Image (cartoon, helix red, strand yellow):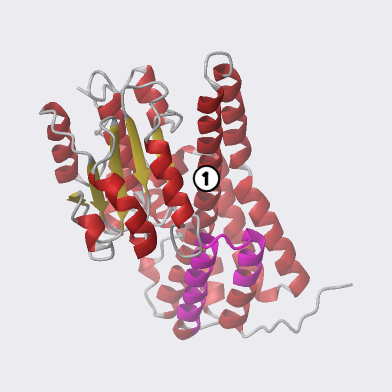
Amino acid sequence: MPDAFENILGQAQVRDFLRATIVHDRVSHAYLFTGPAGSNKTLAAYAFSQAILCKEGGCPDCDCCQRVMRRKHPDVRYFAPEGVGGYLVEQVREIITDTGLAPIQASRKVYILDRVDLLGTQAANAFLKTLEEPPEDVVLILLGRTRESVLPTIVSRCQVVPFRHIPAGEAAGILSQNTGASTQLAHIAIQACGGSITNAVDFLKSPERMAFRAQVLEVLGSLALADDWDVLTYAQDLVVKARSPLDVVRAAQDEELAESADFLAKSAIRQLEARNKRMLSAASLESLRQMTAIIRSWLRDIMVVCGGCLGLVINTDIQSTIEEAAGRTDVARTVAALEACRHADEAIAYNVSPETCIDALLFEIREVLYGTSRANKAPV
């Protein structure tokens, strides 16, 4: 019988553990899910939230499960670091205050805190009492990259659930098996989504995301001959395109608020508005990360071609343009371009302007790959 956990792909042990926890009514007050990016921690956190709030243990067809699945349930709160380099103490105090409020629709509330490996000592100290003894109707699910990267005082107060790294080849096989996509398309989707099977499933379902990938790759293929004005225009167009899915999210949020306005108290409406703002911020960050993941997949293919391994190219639909780019550069310069991509990801995570990040990244890629300086002045 289908349940909330069936889509946690590639993590059989985690899936079995979470199911058993619900079946035997052993839900603890705090969990720490640890694993690399793309290991399905966030999906598992939402699936577990469904099962915790659903009267049938995560059916997953009821209105409660559907709302959690669509990330619209007011009693499932998602948080990510808002400060430069981590969580702000003020942000943590707001979360603590929020845990003291009654649930809006369900009998319990679930708080999902992403990247708690970026929870510094001061912010963590403010959180410890709540983490150790939260209100009886609150469950805390913390997400971190590794157990060692999370402060020991946090780890000791949580039940740790480790997620394994899923190799790209295995992830593509799982994706192909569960969606019917060709092996080639599954590999492309996995690379475009930074290794995340969950995001890759959504990617394959979206013609808009596939079209966005094509636009990013077209821009990258044009960089060798682009002047400064071209690069600025490319960056602007890509950022606008990356943000276009947010219009759909925003419209759905406005509709939900309009439907809820008649029966929810003002305090509950404010909670929904705050949640919607966080969701928009997370969706914007995800779109930008997908752009940089597509760029990394292109650079990776250039590197393997430079190394003489043509059979390892992932983006085979543009292999001729990849080989052309590889003919203009070498492995060392491609590695430098990949490092620039990593710096762009960090800057985006630190809330640097997306336009500034993508401008700088495209200029840097052009310069390090092809030795093209910024001396090409844009027309006045």
Q: Amino acid at mark 1?
A: Ala
Q: Residue furthest left?
A: 24
147 with respect to 74 (left or right): left
Which image quarter: residue 124?
bottom left
Residue 192 sits inside the magenta stretch: no
Above or below for 183 versus 64: below
Query: On the picture, is 156 further left or further right than 175?
Result: left
Find the residue positioned furthest to the top.
262
> Is the C terminus in the top left, top right, bottom left or bottom right quadrant?
bottom right
Q: Main secondary structure of the magenta part?
A: helix
Label 1 sits on residue: 283
Q: Is residue 339 left or right of residue 374?
A: left
Left or right: where 284 falls relative to 5: right
Residue 93: percent from left, percent from top: 43, 48
Q: Quadrant of residue 119?
A: bottom left
Q: Is residue 44 visible?
A: no
Which residue appears at 57% of the width and 30% of the height?
A: 253
Spot occupied by residue 333 in the image (x, y as percentages of width and height) = 50, 83
Label 1's element?
Answer: helix
- Which residue is found at the position 18% from the left and 34% from the top? 27
Q: Which residues are magenta?
A: 333-361
Q: Quadrant of the N terminus?
A: top left
Residue 331: x and y, percent? Answer: 45, 82
Is residue 346 on the magenta stretch?
A: yes
The answer to whether residue 200 is visible is yes
